[in-house]
Image: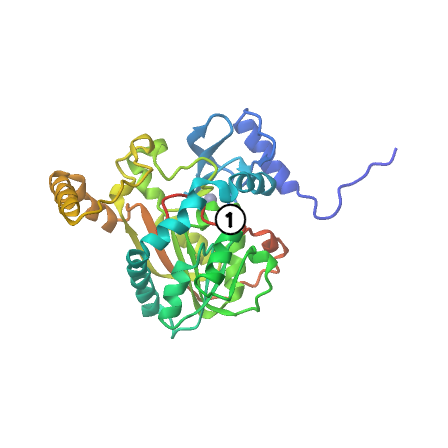
Amino acid sequence: MAITLPARGFKWREIIISMRLIFQNPCPVPKQFDLIACEGCGSNRFSTLTDWNDLSKVVQCGQCGLQFVNPMPNQEYLDQLYQQDGEEHPYYRNYLLERTDRRSSYSKQYHRRLKLIENYAKGKGKLLDIGCGGGFFLKTAEERGWEPHGIDIVPGFIQFARNELQLKNTHCRSLEDLEYDKHFFDVIVLWDLIEHLPRPANFLETINRLLRPDGLLVIWTPNANNAAWLKENWFGYKPLQHLYFFSPRTLSQILQSAGFSVVYKNTNRAKKGFFTAPENRPYKKPERPLSKVDKIISGTKRDLKNFINPVNYISPLLDWTGYGFNLYVIGKKTAECTKENGEAKNASAKISTPSSDLTK
Ligand SMILES: [Zn+2]
């Protein structure tokens, strides 16, 4: 009887890794989830950080320290997840209202971010925001002299960006569906995006090709170091919304592998997640006072509360030592990604900005 040999390129390595993982972890892998090796270094030695009702878990690589969801939901599952939420999700419904209402306060924040980016950029050129939402950041960039480009998968956001903010270079597509020329952009920004991607290393390689030499990649993501106190109860471990959890060290490593050198690194707002368990977090922002007197009273109460709260005095120290909630990194493209990377087409930019804690 003839024996059929596996076709060339048969993924023995992946099979062996999967078998090892199955023996290490006797729980069956749910359908639409795949056991994966570490995206940062290829290792298959992990320790478990937190379990999510047998569906999946957050693990930490024993070799490079990268934290991620394993088994990892596959693209089909993620597409379903985001389709289910879609524009009916409260976050999507409130996003445009809130950003319009508080536009001047967000605008100040965007100016600060852009000012920092401009310290490292060679002039102002083409800037791409992946997961651009309604385009508020891009509008500020345009006001400062940048040529704004944006993509998002939520049709309502792009409609708003094009019609209300007159941002013509915005598209309701994923990155792999658009054919930008190689070296097209001067700056690419990912605000609260990279933690949602199932293949971040591939994605960064795609970005490398789109950036011109010395171009900048700007990343803002929750900082895994911020989980040091609360461990598995940390707010950033959002089941299946966040798939990767970077620290300053692991993000720098993965950026270096994709041809970037880190030129700026900072963490901030430590108190946002360091001591507050998810169940105690106020998910809904309090109503803002309407009258001037109410504003003064609520402002004084807030200042007094902050004055006697020891966390406020510890926070700056935590931020400074790399334990802040947000991790803000600017990488400069210093090497061309030379891998002939067919897989990079799978790198998913299909995910917009589904979390509710964004500062975009
Ligand atoms: Zn690793």
- Residue 72 in view: yes
Say which quarter of the image contains residue 13.
top right
Q: Residue at x 56, y 68 (%)?
A: 182
Read off the residue under disc 1: 351
- Residue 331 in view: no
Q: Residue at x 11, y 39 (%)?
A: 308
Classify residue 163 as left or right of residue 301.
right
Q: Indicate the secondary structure of the residue bearing disc 1.
A: loop
**In front here: 72 or 235?**
235
**In front here: 8 or 50?**
50
- The response on whether ligand 1 sits within 8 Å of label 1 is no
Q: Position of residue 202 (x, y in %)?
A: 54, 53
Amino acid residing under circle 1: Ile
Quadrant for the N terminus in the image: top right
Residue 211 in the image: above or below residue 53: below
Residue 18 in the image: above or below residue 195: above
Q: Residue furthest bottom?
A: 123
Q: Position of residue 169 (x, y in %)?
A: 51, 66
